[in-house]
Image (spheres, helix red, strand yellow):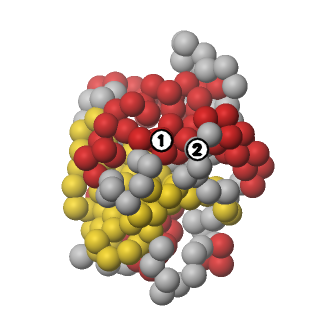
Amino acid sequence: MTIPEDRPPIDPYPLSPYVAWAGKRNRGPILDAFKTLFPASGDVLELATGSGQHINFFAPEFPGLRFQPSDYDTDVFPAIRRNRDEVGNTNVLDPVKIDLTDPSTWPEANNPLYDVIFVINIFQVAPVSIADGIAALAAHALKPGGFVAIYGPFKIDGAYTTASNEEFDKEILAAKVPEWGLKDVRDLEKAASKHGIVLKQRLDLPANNFILVFGRE
Protein backbone atom coordinates (compact mmCIF):
# COMPACT_ATOMS: atom_id res chain seq x y z
CA MET A 1 0.00 0.00 0.00
CA THR A 2 1.17 3.49 -0.82
CA ILE A 3 1.21 5.54 2.39
CA PRO A 4 -0.37 8.98 1.90
CA GLU A 5 1.58 12.07 2.90
CA ASP A 6 -1.46 13.96 4.21
CA ARG A 7 -3.70 12.62 6.93
CA PRO A 8 -6.66 10.64 5.52
CA PRO A 9 -10.08 10.52 7.24
CA ILE A 10 -10.13 8.41 10.40
CA ASP A 11 -10.76 4.76 9.56
CA PRO A 12 -9.74 2.07 12.10
CA TYR A 13 -9.78 -0.79 9.58
CA PRO A 14 -6.23 -2.20 9.84
CA LEU A 15 -5.58 -2.05 6.11
CA SER A 16 -6.93 1.48 5.63
CA PRO A 17 -4.85 4.44 4.37
CA TYR A 18 -5.42 6.19 7.72
CA VAL A 19 -3.91 3.34 9.72
CA ALA A 20 -0.96 3.16 7.32
CA TRP A 21 -0.41 6.93 7.64
CA ALA A 22 -0.65 6.88 11.45
CA GLY A 23 1.62 3.85 11.67
CA LYS A 24 4.38 5.48 9.63
CA ARG A 25 4.06 8.67 11.69
CA ASN A 26 4.53 6.99 15.07
CA ARG A 27 6.73 3.98 14.40
CA GLY A 28 10.09 5.76 14.78
CA PRO A 29 9.47 7.13 18.29
CA ILE A 30 7.98 3.80 19.38
CA LEU A 31 11.06 1.97 18.12
CA ASP A 32 13.33 4.36 20.04
CA ALA A 33 11.39 3.63 23.23
CA PHE A 34 11.37 -0.13 22.61
CA LYS A 35 15.15 -0.07 22.26
CA THR A 36 15.28 1.03 25.91
CA LEU A 37 12.76 -1.59 27.05
CA PHE A 38 13.17 -4.81 25.06
CA PRO A 39 15.58 -7.57 26.13
CA ALA A 40 18.44 -8.63 23.87
CA SER A 41 16.90 -12.05 23.27
CA GLY A 42 13.60 -13.81 23.79
CA ASP A 43 10.06 -13.81 22.45
CA VAL A 44 7.70 -10.92 21.67
CA LEU A 45 3.97 -11.06 20.95
CA GLU A 46 2.14 -8.25 19.17
CA LEU A 47 -1.62 -8.09 19.69
CA ALA A 48 -3.87 -6.59 17.00
CA THR A 49 -1.04 -6.66 14.48
CA GLY A 50 -3.21 -5.51 11.58
CA SER A 51 -1.18 -5.16 8.38
CA GLY A 52 2.09 -5.99 10.12
CA GLN A 53 3.48 -2.52 9.50
CA HIS A 54 4.88 -2.07 13.00
CA ILE A 55 6.17 -5.55 13.76
CA ASN A 56 8.03 -5.73 10.45
CA PHE A 57 9.55 -2.29 11.04
CA PHE A 58 10.76 -3.24 14.53
CA ALA A 59 12.00 -6.79 13.92
CA PRO A 60 15.23 -5.99 12.00
CA GLU A 61 16.40 -3.86 14.95
CA PHE A 62 16.19 -6.83 17.35
CA PRO A 63 17.88 -9.81 15.70
CA GLY A 64 17.95 -11.72 19.00
CA LEU A 65 14.17 -11.61 19.40
CA ARG A 66 11.46 -13.75 17.82
CA PHE A 67 8.34 -11.77 16.96
CA GLN A 68 4.88 -13.36 16.96
CA PRO A 69 2.20 -11.35 15.12
CA SER A 70 -1.45 -11.96 16.00
CA ASP A 71 -4.90 -10.61 15.24
CA TYR A 72 -8.53 -11.62 15.69
CA ASP A 73 -9.16 -10.91 11.99
CA THR A 74 -7.53 -13.61 9.90
CA ASP A 75 -8.21 -11.57 6.74
CA VAL A 76 -5.14 -9.46 7.57
CA PHE A 77 -2.78 -12.44 7.72
CA PRO A 78 -1.75 -12.25 4.03
CA ALA A 79 -0.75 -8.59 4.52
CA ILE A 80 1.37 -9.49 7.55
CA ARG A 81 3.16 -12.23 5.61
CA ARG A 82 3.59 -9.99 2.56
CA ASN A 83 5.14 -7.21 4.62
CA ARG A 84 7.43 -9.72 6.31
CA ASP A 85 8.57 -11.29 3.06
CA GLU A 86 9.15 -7.93 1.35
CA VAL A 87 11.79 -6.99 3.94
CA GLY A 88 13.04 -10.53 4.57
CA ASN A 89 12.34 -10.69 8.30
CA THR A 90 13.37 -14.18 9.33
CA ASN A 91 12.59 -13.46 12.99
CA VAL A 92 8.89 -12.76 12.37
CA LEU A 93 6.74 -15.89 12.69
CA ASP A 94 3.52 -16.69 10.86
CA PRO A 95 0.55 -14.84 12.39
CA VAL A 96 -1.82 -16.57 14.80
CA LYS A 97 -5.42 -15.77 15.72
CA ILE A 98 -5.88 -14.18 19.14
CA ASP A 99 -9.25 -12.70 20.06
CA LEU A 100 -8.93 -10.81 23.34
CA THR A 101 -12.59 -11.48 24.09
CA ASP A 102 -12.22 -15.25 23.58
CA PRO A 103 -9.77 -17.01 25.94
CA SER A 104 -9.98 -20.20 23.89
CA THR A 105 -7.83 -18.44 21.26
CA TRP A 106 -5.11 -17.44 23.72
CA PRO A 107 -1.78 -19.23 24.33
CA GLU A 108 -2.14 -22.19 26.67
CA ALA A 109 -2.48 -21.31 30.34
CA ASN A 110 0.46 -21.96 32.66
CA ASN A 111 2.89 -21.94 29.74
CA PRO A 112 4.78 -18.63 29.91
CA LEU A 113 5.88 -17.85 26.38
CA TYR A 114 6.67 -14.17 26.02
CA ASP A 115 9.16 -11.68 27.40
CA VAL A 116 7.16 -8.82 25.89
CA ILE A 117 3.57 -8.31 24.76
CA PHE A 118 2.82 -5.07 22.94
CA VAL A 119 -0.19 -3.43 21.32
CA ILE A 120 -0.36 -0.16 19.38
CA ASN A 121 -3.23 2.27 18.84
CA ILE A 122 -6.30 0.19 19.61
CA PHE A 123 -7.92 1.78 22.64
CA GLN A 124 -9.28 4.87 20.89
CA VAL A 125 -11.46 2.52 18.81
CA ALA A 126 -11.85 -0.40 21.24
CA PRO A 127 -13.68 -0.82 24.56
CA VAL A 128 -11.71 -0.41 27.76
CA SER A 129 -12.78 -3.99 28.57
CA ILE A 130 -10.13 -5.10 26.08
CA ALA A 131 -7.64 -4.17 28.81
CA ASP A 132 -9.19 -6.99 30.84
CA GLY A 133 -8.33 -9.44 28.08
CA ILE A 134 -4.79 -8.11 27.66
CA ALA A 135 -4.12 -8.37 31.40
CA ALA A 136 -5.65 -11.83 31.72
CA LEU A 137 -3.58 -13.07 28.78
CA ALA A 138 -0.45 -11.45 30.20
CA ALA A 139 -1.00 -13.02 33.61
CA HIS A 140 -0.41 -16.49 32.22
CA ALA A 141 1.56 -15.88 28.99
CA LEU A 142 4.36 -13.60 30.23
CA LYS A 143 7.65 -15.09 31.32
CA PRO A 144 8.93 -14.02 34.77
CA GLY A 145 9.97 -10.38 34.54
CA GLY A 146 8.07 -9.89 31.28
CA PHE A 147 5.97 -6.84 30.54
CA VAL A 148 3.14 -5.44 28.42
CA ALA A 149 3.65 -2.20 26.45
CA ILE A 150 0.53 -0.33 25.33
CA TYR A 151 0.96 2.65 22.99
CA GLY A 152 -1.57 5.35 22.23
CA PRO A 153 -3.25 8.57 23.36
CA PHE A 154 -5.00 8.48 26.76
CA LYS A 155 -6.70 10.67 29.30
CA ILE A 156 -5.37 10.73 32.88
CA ASP A 157 -7.71 11.04 35.87
CA GLY A 158 -10.51 12.04 33.52
CA ALA A 159 -8.58 14.92 31.97
CA TYR A 160 -7.02 15.42 28.56
CA THR A 161 -3.25 15.84 28.63
CA THR A 162 -3.27 18.31 25.72
CA ALA A 163 -5.75 20.41 23.76
CA SER A 164 -4.87 18.48 20.60
CA ASN A 165 -5.86 15.18 22.25
CA GLU A 166 -9.17 16.75 23.25
CA GLU A 167 -9.77 17.76 19.63
CA PHE A 168 -8.79 14.28 18.44
CA ASP A 169 -11.22 12.72 20.90
CA LYS A 170 -14.03 14.99 19.73
CA GLU A 171 -13.33 13.93 16.17
CA ILE A 172 -13.51 10.25 17.12
CA LEU A 173 -16.65 10.69 19.21
CA ALA A 174 -18.35 12.56 16.35
CA ALA A 175 -18.48 9.27 14.46
CA LYS A 176 -20.96 8.09 17.15
CA VAL A 177 -19.58 4.55 17.17
CA PRO A 178 -20.05 2.79 20.53
CA GLU A 179 -16.82 2.44 22.53
CA TRP A 180 -14.86 4.85 20.33
CA GLY A 181 -13.00 7.59 22.18
CA LEU A 182 -9.88 8.13 24.27
CA LYS A 183 -9.70 5.93 27.36
CA ASP A 184 -8.42 6.85 30.80
CA VAL A 185 -5.16 5.36 32.06
CA ARG A 186 -6.82 4.77 35.44
CA ASP A 187 -9.52 2.59 33.85
CA LEU A 188 -6.85 0.44 32.22
CA GLU A 189 -5.10 0.14 35.58
CA LYS A 190 -8.34 -0.90 37.26
CA ALA A 191 -9.03 -3.58 34.64
CA ALA A 192 -5.48 -4.92 34.82
CA SER A 193 -5.31 -5.02 38.62
CA LYS A 194 -7.94 -7.77 38.73
CA HIS A 195 -5.35 -10.05 37.16
CA GLY A 196 -2.37 -8.99 39.27
CA ILE A 197 -1.04 -6.76 36.48
CA VAL A 198 -0.04 -3.21 37.44
CA LEU A 199 1.26 -0.08 35.73
CA LYS A 200 5.03 0.06 36.16
CA GLN A 201 6.02 2.97 33.92
CA ARG A 202 4.52 5.68 31.71
CA LEU A 203 6.66 7.01 28.88
CA ASP A 204 5.80 10.29 27.13
CA LEU A 205 6.15 10.08 23.35
CA PRO A 206 5.75 12.64 20.55
CA ALA A 207 2.30 13.62 19.23
CA ASN A 208 0.92 13.51 22.79
CA ASN A 209 1.00 9.73 23.05
CA PHE A 210 2.19 7.39 25.79
CA ILE A 211 3.67 3.96 26.21
CA LEU A 212 2.15 2.34 29.29
CA VAL A 213 4.31 -0.47 30.68
CA PHE A 214 2.45 -3.07 32.74
CA GLY A 215 3.83 -6.07 34.61
CA ARG A 216 3.06 -8.45 37.45
CA GLU A 217 2.81 -7.07 40.97
Report the disc number at residue 186: none
> Along the line of sight, which residue is nearer the eye, 94 or 205?
94
Decide if residue 60 is on the left or right side of residue 84.
left
Taking depth in this image into account, of 100 and 107 the one nearest to the observer is 107
Q: Residue at x 45, y 78 (%)?
A: 112
- Please provide percent x and percent y for residue 20: 59, 29
Rendered-image quadrant of the C terminus: bottom left
Q: Residue 24: image x %, image y %?
A: 50, 27
* Secondary structure found at label 2: loop
Check contact, mark 2 vs mark 1: CB within 8 A: yes
- Residue 159 visible in the shown view: no
* Label 2 Cα crowd, 10 Å radius (few <14 / some 14-19 / many 20+): some
The quarter of the picture where residue 107 lies is: bottom right
Q: Which residue does the numbered mark 2 point to in the structure image?
A: 89
Spatial distance from mark 2 to mark 1, Cα to Cα?
7 Å
Residue 118 visible in rendering:
yes
Residue at 65% in and 25% down:
17
Indicate left or right for 198 with 84 as reference: left
Q: Residues within 10 Å of mark 1 (few under 14, many from 20)?
A: some
- Residue shown at the point (61%, 20%) measured from the top left: 3
Q: Quadrant of the N terminus?
A: top right
Asked which quadrant contains residue 102, the reply is bottom right
Q: How many marks?
A: 2
User: Label 2 amino acid?
Assistant: Asn
Which residue, as the protein is rendered here, is positioned at the far top?
Answer: 6
The residue that disc 1 covers is 60
